[in-house]
């Protein structure tokens, strides 16, 4: 095997089974180019710290230090809400676009194969999308993120955290619907 290929997989649990994910091939990173920018921009807004939006004052007195915090200005709070809503909308549009969904499926399949295996086919992508439910798809994307942590860096970690949050919410809604149907 060539020295530029890392044969070491990252193990990640998908639906209770441990699966192996590999670093993405260079061609796959090129395909992610159009997805990466809107996702990274949205994640930056959603995970941005707004600590500096509030004023804080620390006063030293004889009996100790007292601090006061001033509330966020209403106009700024409204702008932050609009920014978050816009970012969530853009993230949903990006991820839920059919062509982008195919690219993400191809990314998952690429990450699950060793470099010496054949190129992923359109038929494999379509079959994967037809047979995979949303929670499983998200678990696979988390595995891809873990296997490519060095490439994706902090943005990849944030996407993985957001994906885990979405997965938890999907699970809660599924459990709730199941228990209501059984009642």
Image (cartoon, grey):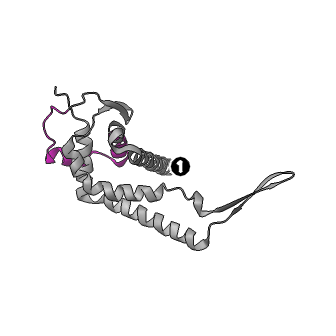
- Frontmost residue, 92 versus 182: 92
- 5 within the magenta span: no
Please state the horizontal and vertical placement of residue 120, each as a whole percent of the image: 16, 42
Please state the horizontal and vertical placement of residue 11, each as a whole percent of the image: 35, 30
Query: At 21% from the left edge and 40% from the top edge, which residue is drawn?
Result: 25
117 vs 12, left or right, is left
Task: State whether residue 22 appears in this view.
Answer: yes
Query: At 60% from the left edge and 72% from the top edge, which residue is drawn?
Result: 74
- Frontmost residue, 42 versus 12: 42
Query: At 33% from the left edge and 62% from the top edge, which residue is drawn?
Result: 93
Question: Tag 1: Cα neighbours inside 10 Å, few (<14), some, or many (≥20)?
Answer: few
2 vs 100, left or right, is left
178 vs 61, left or right, is left
Task: State whether residue 130 appears in this view.
Answer: no
Quadrant in which the N terminus appears? top left
Q: Which residues are magenta?
A: 115-144
Report the magenta stretch's main SS: helix
Query: At 17% from the left edge and 43% from the top edge, which residue is drawn?
Result: 124
- Frontmost residue, 177 versus 138: 138
- Frontmost residue, 156 versus 173: 156
Give the residue number, with chain letter if any, for mark 1.
183
Please state the horizontal and vertical placement of residue 22, each as a whole percent of the image: 27, 34
- Give the answer, above or below, for where 58 lies relative to 7: below
Please state the horizontal and vertical placement of residue 40, each as a whole percent of the image: 37, 55
């Amino acid at each position: 095997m060539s020295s530029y290929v890392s044969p070491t997989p990252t193990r990640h649990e998908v639906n209770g089974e441990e699966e192996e994910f590999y670093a993405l091939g260079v061609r796959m990173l090129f395909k992610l180019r159009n997805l990466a920018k809107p996702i990274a921009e949205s994640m930056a807004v959603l995970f941005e710290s707004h600590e500096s939006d509030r004023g804080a004052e620390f006063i030293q007195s004889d009996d100790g230090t007292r601090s006061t915090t001033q509330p966020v200005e209403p106009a700024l709070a409204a702008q932050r809400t609009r920014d978050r809503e816009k970012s969530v909308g853009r993230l949903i549009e990006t991820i839920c676009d059919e062509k982008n969904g195919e690219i993400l499926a191809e990314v998952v399949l690429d990450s699950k194969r060793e470099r010496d295996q054949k190129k992923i086919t359109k038929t494999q992508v379509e079959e994967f999308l037809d047979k995979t439910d949303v929670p499983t798809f998200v678990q696979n994307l988390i595995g891809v993120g873990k296997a490519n942590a060095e490439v994706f860096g902090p943005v990849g970690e944030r996407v993985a955290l957001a994906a885990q949050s979405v997965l938890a919410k999907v699970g809660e809604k599924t459990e709730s619907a199941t228990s209501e149907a059984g009642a």
